[in-house]
Image (cartoon, helix red, strand yellow):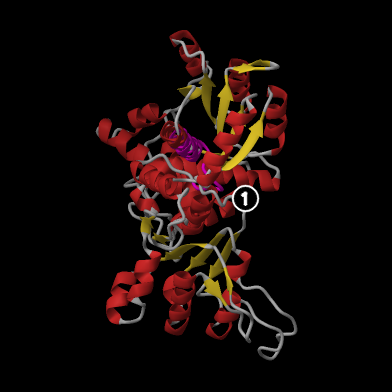
Amino acid sequence: MTHATVLIVDDEPRLRRVLEMLLSDRGHRVLPAATLRDARRILTSEQVDVALVDLMLPDGSGLEFLRTLQESAPDIASVMMTAFGTIETAVEAMQLGARTYLVKPFDSAQVDAVIARALEWRRARRQEVFLKDQAVSGLAGFIGQTHVMRQVFDLIARVGPTAAPVLLRGETGTGKELAARAVHAASGRADALFVALNCAAIPAALLEAELFGVMRGAFTGAHADREGKFELADGGTLFLDEIGDLPLEMQAKLLRVIEQGVVERLGGGLPHRVDARIIAATHRDLEAMAKAGTFRADLFYRLAVVPITLPPLRARRDDLPLLAEDAVARFARRIGRPMRLTADALVTLRDYDWPGNVRELHNVLERAVLLSDDGVLDGLQLAELLAPPLATPRGLPKVREVPPLAEVVAAAERHAIREALLATGDNKTRAAERLGISVRALWYKLRRLGLADGEPEPTPPRHAP
């Protein structure tokens, strides 16, 4: 059973003591209150998971307190207790947010069942709120409404409240660290530290000190004792990015710490226990590496208790408008100028394959915002930023050099004159009328455009009035 903080609001001292003993034996933390005033005071300073509330209290009704909880703390799972149980009171309690109803006297099995139901409701509510937040506004930029992303969010919400190790897999730039932070935020460790270490960015000789800490004098330059990432993450989450780049020797040491929960600093520090949840991430195929002997199979199975695969951006193109609008809004706020994406800009973004995934999308959009003169990002601007050598687009309109205006005008005139001459049987006078110009102007254009095939027709003499 998940341990919880339980508020007991009842004016009977004996009942409070019995409930406190029973719930404490189950591993729960109990906060007793004899009055509504005491209960409200506790709520201002404590994080409560479940509230057991008596109906009749010296300074008011328990129903009144349920109303307060529903308005100010809707995540608390409340349970109404009374010796005067009636259908009407039960219905009113449910309408005011009570999860269930407990009639006195009750036994320990009934209390256990009620607490279990209350905690299950609270877990489901936290998951619902988490998923809603993800779908609407994202978590630190982790945004998506497509089916594949909703599956990811659902997995994160399910595994978040547990202590199970998580292995995040996906291409570079798919948001594996954001997913790790989302798992941490959905857990009971959210108030503790989230400590990240990129295994590919630390030289192999320094990895052990970074992970497990170092004692003064352990090596040249170690002038003081220093905590490692495991110690810093004690009670929180340790995120090991690019775990596939961890050297084999360090893999063995990491496995030992995960299995034993004990770390020893480099240089002879005393062993001590740590409680850090492990979330690892990689873009590599760890199963294939394990078969090839470049990654320990036993470590892989320890890390991949819950594997979560982050889809590439090309597999969730319908999320592009959400991601792009959010990124452009953030970049625009940084430079203090309004900025918007046109409809053809969104088409251009959807037609590109994004080999660098969300990271590449953010890079392109930030450059587009910085280079924009009018606060409007259109498809042509983005197509130019996406042109090779950065990457090869899929079906992206090719960016070509714009010809001089004179050439464009000449080509248009040549086409219009040919059409007019064809329509009039090469009659220059009638063709000029169709074009809305004089015959003299037509002959001038024919010569300039290289279309003249003879001398101009004589101009009729002007008669005196």
Kindly indicate the quadrant of the structure image that contains residue 329: top right
The front one of 113 and 336 is: 113
- Residue positioned most to the left: 425
Q: Give the main secondary structure, helix, strand or loop, of the magenta stretch.
A: helix
The residue at 46%/49% (across/down) is 160
Does residue 269 lie above or below 463 as drawn? below
Percent position of residue 39, x then y: 68, 28
Mark 1: amino acid? Asp
Horizontal side of residue 397 vs 4, given as left or right: left
Say if the magenta span includes residue 132: yes
Which quarter of the rendered picture does the N terminus lie within?
A: top left
Q: Is residue 225 visible?
A: yes
SS under mark 1: loop
Percent position of residue 317, x then y: 37, 45
The residue at 42%/28% (across/down) is 460
Percent position of residue 243, x then y: 45, 71
Say which residue label 1 marks: 191
Q: Is residue 401 visible?
A: no
Say if the magenta span includes residue 218: no
Does residue 274 lie above or below 188 as drawn? below
Kindly indicate the quadrant of the structure image that contains residue 53: top right
The front one of 463 and 169 is: 169
The residue at 56%/52% (across/down) is 189
The front one of 445 and 143 is: 143
Residue stretch rendered in magenta on the structure: 118-142
